Image (cartoon, grey):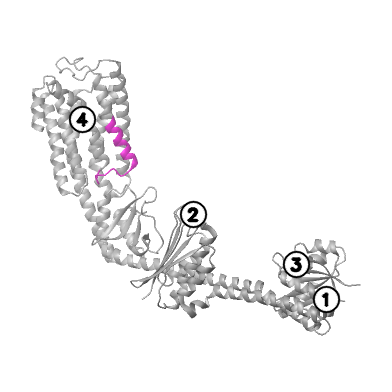
Amino acid sequence: MGVAAFVVMLNGEHNVHRGAFAGLFLATGWGFVGVGLWVWKQRSAGNMGPLMVAVGLSAFVKGLVFSNDSVVFAIASVGEVLIYAVLIQLLLSFPSGRLETRLDRLLVTIAYVNTTVVQLGVFLFTDSKAGCASCPSNPLLIEHSQAEAVLSAAQLDISIALLGAVVAVLYRRWRSGTPGRARVFAPIVAVGGLAFLLLMAALIVEQAGLSSDISDAQTLALFASIACLPFAFLVGLLRSRFSEADAISALLAQLGEGGGRGALRDALADALGDPTLQLAYWVPGQDAYVDADGQAVRVDPAPAGKVSTIVEHEGERIAAIVHSPGLAEGRELVQTAGAAAGLTLRNERLDAELRAKVAELQASRLRIVQAGYEQRRRLERDLHDGAQQRLMALGIDLRMVRERIEHDPLGAAELLDESLHELNEATAELRELARGIHPSVLTNRGLHAALKGLASRSPVPVELLQTPTDRLPPSVESAVYFVVAEALTNAARYSRAQTVTVGVVRDNGHIDVEVSDDGVGGADADQGSGLRGLQDRVAALDGRLDLTSPQGLGTTLRAMIPCA
Amino acid sequence: MRETVLIVDDHPSFRASARRMLEANGYAVVGELDNGDGVVAAVEKLNPEVVLLDVHLPDIDGFEVTRRLLDGNGATPQIVFVSSHDFTDLDEAVGASGARGFVAKSELSAEAISLLIR
């Protein structure tokens, strides 16, 4: 294609500086394609290789506008400015090959629309013969009209603003960041910036009406600078490679020195030049990320203005690095750094996992102590307000009976009836209270009898599917009993269910408890202390409690408790 | 003339037994109340000679009720504290409160009350 373009350009009747143009286009196209293919082969710079090849090919397309054939001429005329859009994408995605920020993606999108849709619009209304007698005629011409001038002017304004924005972004990227990053960016900002400034100058001249078209001399200067760009990229990428190597060796040296908790984060932050970098360790048991202190860290989605890079060690996810998206050295370096720190990372992760577990244990222990305190208080209040008051009243009544029994036996008998009633009430209250502390039927007759008792007292009909026939450890039996009791209480209070099914299965070293109702669903495990208390009770036995309660589809409470 | 009593306690079974006992022993129970807040108004309205007052009420405690009653302008009734808790520790506080004295609920009898009031 390059050779074809070269031949076309040399023979182009409407090309004034045939030799110079043909040479430059060839140098630009082949420069980009050659360097692009080499970078592509290195596989280390993302899309940088393919993008450079695309720039090279679009340079050839631009060269084809000098064709004498009207079809080739038309295709090339529409595609001739595409090269600028690809160039903008290439510059903004340096050095990772990805557009990391929203601004980058916005600028590139505008560039492509401006060089394809708008360009086609302009060409549809352009009479190529006007002002260039030797040019081939435009086969796509609808009508040479005012539309061409209007669209051209709009395209020009957009182009100038866009180029200004791109140069500003590149400049900022070069200025901000570590010295290593500045060194990587310097050649690209110098050559790319120069090319874009030249292009902008040419466009401004055209906008001001000083020249009807970009002059050939300016075009030559512009293309000379673009021709140098692939080599600037090459230098930049090589420098970035060296700066990566520097960063990694610095990291390894720092890791060798050891250090306390958080030292690894500091080392990575130094090596990657991002002081805000956060290191989050993956805790498989909790399906969550935590920091070195065991506190939860948000990774996916990353916090606003941050991106997360997952680090794996021997195929196993061990951590995530939450860093700023503009990290010049790109995600590849973050991954390389993560991999280099792999072993240390794994050890620190185990440490963090332990801390997370300790933190959770401390929290649950505190909740258990608090729940115990609450329970004792409630018990004291229940005893005081219930049975104790009845027994006090009974005492008063019995004293009266003693006084009366001789002179008023009938009145005394009446009082005794009253007293017996109080005594029965007090006994019933004490029985209920005792069952709340620990159901004696559970101790005496086992889980099946205790669950049957619960089912018979439930206001919502209960279908008891299955219960283990063997006796289980008392702590497990008690946990199962209270899981079922709480689920039945909740079903009666909130679910508006017609029936509840209860199943307790012993399977593979586990007791699997499932209580499902056909009610309204929508229960929330975080609301109410009952479920949280159960969660702690089950967790204390190394089990887990899951609540599924989709709106309108019933509620299922499930507990899995290890039981050898 | 029978002595008039207002019973203030939040437990209905205790109020019922106390009323039976007092009435059987010649007292006239003129009212029952299950909270501390309404005591001043009830006393103004019913003008009892004795208030049998639970120390632990759901809103304000018996000591606070006593303070309000004694701070008032009108004639104040004689106050006898009752409680199901052991109040031997509170002898001093009861003495300082201006109440006539304290009877444990388990010991409540007409005799115990008559020993405290004038």
Q: Secondary structure at mark 2?
A: loop
User: Is A112 a magenta residue?
Assistant: yes
Task: Mark 3 vs mark 1: tell me if same chain.
Answer: yes
Q: Residues within 10 Å of mark 2 (few under 14, many from 20)?
A: some
Task: Mark 4 vs mark 3: tell me if same chain.
Answer: no
Q: Answer whether labels 1 and 2 touch (C-beta < 8 Å).
A: no
Label 4 to label 2: alpha-carbon separation? 71 Å
User: Viewer-nearest of labels 3 and 1?
Assistant: 1
Which span of residues is magenta-colored? A94-113
Quadrant of the image occupied by residue A320 = bottom left
Q: Residues within 10 Å of mark 3 (few under 14, many from 20)?
A: some
User: Viewer-nearest of labels 4 and 3?
Assistant: 3
Residue A109: x and y in percent read 30, 35
Label 3 to label 2: alpha-carbon separation? 48 Å
Disc 4 marks which residue?
A222
Residue A13, placed above or below residue A251:
above
Q: Secondary structure at mark 3?
A: helix
Disc 1 marks which residue?
B24
Task: Tell me which numbered mark, 4 or 2, is placed earlier along the sequence.
Answer: 4
Label 4 to label 1: alpha-carbon separation? 118 Å
Disc 3 marks which residue?
B64
Taking the image as shown, residue A61 lies to the left or right of residue B101, namely left
